[in-house]
Amino acid sequence: MFERNDWIFGLVSLTLGIAVLFYSRTFDVVTSMDPSGPAAMPRIVAWLMIFIGIVHIAASASIIKNGKKPKESGKKGSYKPVVMICAACAVYYLLLESIGYIVMTPLLIMSIMASVGERNVKSLVSTSVGTTLVLFLIFYCVLQVNMPLGILSVFFN
Amino acid sequence: MENFLIGIQALLSIKSLLAILAGVTWGTIGGIIPGINATIAMALLLPFTWGMEPQVAVMMLGGVYCGGEYGGSIPAILIGTPGTNAAAATVFDGYEMHKKGETGLALYLSLYSSVFGGLFGAVCLMLMAIPLAGIALAFGPAEYFLLALVGLTLICSLGENNILKGIWAGLFGILLSFIGFDPFAGTPRFTFGILDLTSGLEMVALMMGLFAVSEVLRQAQNFDINDKYKFDKKNDTSMPKLSVFKKFLSVNIIASVIGVIVGAMPGAGATVASFLSYSYFKRSSKNPDSFGKGNPVGVAAPEAANNAVTGGAMVPLLALGIPGSNSTAIMLGALIIHNVNPGPMLFVDHPEIPYGIFSSLFVANIMMIFVGIVCIKCAVKITAISKPALFACIVTLVFTGSYAFNSVHFDVLVAFLCGIAGYFMRRMNLPHAATVLGFVLGYIMEANLRRALILTRGSYLKVFLNSPITVALTVIAVISVLWPLVGPLRRSMKVQKTY
């Protein structure tokens, strides 16, 4: 049931639980009409998280103490594409409103495809332009969603 | 009877029929593409339901659910890679049949069994949901709180090795549901002074991030550009005679019963149903060795079962307002997004929705025959979509959908951060599906607990001992948490005895 490196999860759970418990002090409003108040449920959740965190830290410590070997994990893969995709998404979010959907989306698509090793320029361009065009037409023209136009807004006004 | 006519009336409009057809087609294509399952297909479609009438939106999602469960079998047979987890059991015999040259039989038998299972599940849904909803009408806030608690504990405890991690994932979802203004006192909670957080996290962005973006990140980590599928374009995909399918009628009936029972159990789902059905027929076969070597029963059994799940899984959703699976959690989300309160009152307040779903499941399964036949013809091309393009398109669709839903830039960030959270949850073996359910059930739980506490003047004990129903639900919740611990405890005691 428990694993050797569960202490990491335990620590995350413990920290989150304590943070929630600490922060929930700020919304402690109890009235006769609402005897539990807005802090009650967050506190229950926080205490349960603290309990689960402590159990995992203790269990993991016991496994480490007994010298049990860690389980052989299968193919681990590379973190590089994950980090690159996340970076591309972060840049996309930051520049979406100022640069605009039509410019940023093909760049996002190309960056994600390139992150996982796609090097075929024809495929990169056709997928990014095609997908952006289809999505923009559906959301902007058909569903009439106010998409961020950014630097190209002059052409749409 | 009158309500059934309302349901049929809601169904018999061009909008509804087109929505179901679009749903079935997208679901089947999503199921065919490895990496997209029924749940992800439903999550990706959520933003497109924006502006639709609630019953049309739910009918479309029902169509996606049916199509998605079936579509996974096509790549399972053609390339030995299940398009969805639920089609994993189909690989054993389906791929072997394909290698033996019986591709047409395998593909059409899978379609026939899926349609049969889907229709069987729809009939069972009608027979079970209405009486169950009648009982649930007597429920008060305490009963609803405990019902949500039972739903959450059952889902958290099933299918995972570490029940505490399942519970934690559910708690995390509940915690996320607290973000924003408190519904009773209006106090801002966990907003950290950020204005965008005051209205809470957008459900569409959260669901798409947790399911779709995290899956892309997980697959990207293990992806190798040199791994490409090989296709035999000379496959015989012609449809066998109808008399061939009659031989599998009894198999389909038994498998569908298994599917409906498993589907109605919260947390179990289509994957469990298909494997249970497969192993049942293997164990009861006179020639169990033929399984895994191209036995057609090995295709019919899992496919009928995983499609029968669609009807079964909707029983707790429609009757009690408690989702029993990831896909029905998304459907619940869709109802909430359209300002419809799910639960037994749905049958009274919005009869067109539950009765519309009943009728739409029949239509969706019949449409699946035609969509399936077309998809089989062009399946090889669909499965050949390059993974890098698929990853990029999914992420783009998630971000575009998240933004478009409310035209709020911040929702893109929510989807992105939820995707990262989902990725790390997968790494730590935390079931992110429980988080989604926790998020969906969080408001129901808190609102009803607080209402119950007002009635019991702040006594938590009285909430749990309010009525025989609350006592029974408390016992079920406790058992569902403790039961998975019994197995590992027994094993460790046995190990200690042997030493």
Image (tube, coloured by chain):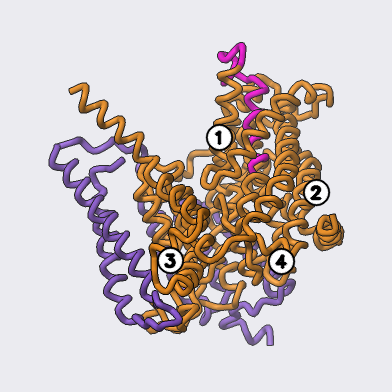
Q: How far is mark 1 from mark 4, CA to CA?
A: 33 Å
Q: Residue at x 53, y 42 (%)?
A: B268
Query: Could you tell which of marks 2 and 4 lies nearer the N-terminus?
Result: 4
Residue on which the image places disc 4? B54
Residue on which the image places disc 3? B417
Q: How far is mark 2 from mark 4, CA to CA?
A: 18 Å
At mark 3, the secondary structure is helix
**Magenta residue span:** B285-309
Residue on which the image places disc 1? B88
Question: Is B371 on the left or on the right of B323, as rendered?
Answer: right
- From the viewer's side, name the closer residue of B290 and B225: B290
Query: Could you tell which of marks 3 and 4 lies nearer the N-terminus?
Result: 4
- The hue used for chain A is purple
Q: Quadrant of residue B174?
A: bottom left
Query: Could you tell which of marks 1 and 4 lies nearer the N-terminus?
Result: 4
Q: How far is mark 2 from mark 1, CA to CA?
A: 26 Å
| Chain identifier of the orange chain | B
Q: Are marks 2 and 4 in contact (CB under 8 Å)?
A: no
Q: Are marks 3 and 4 in contact (CB under 8 Å)?
A: no
Q: Is residue B491 above or below residue B387?
A: above
Q: How far is mark 3 from mark 1, CA to CA?
A: 30 Å
Residue B493: give x, y in percent of width and height: 25, 30
Q: Residue at x 20, y 35 (%)?
A: A69
Query: Could you tell which of marks 3 and 1 lies nearer the N-terminus?
Result: 1
Amino acid at dot 2: Val
Residue on which the image places disc 2? B363
Q: Residues within 10 Å of mark 4 (few under 14, many from 20)?
A: many
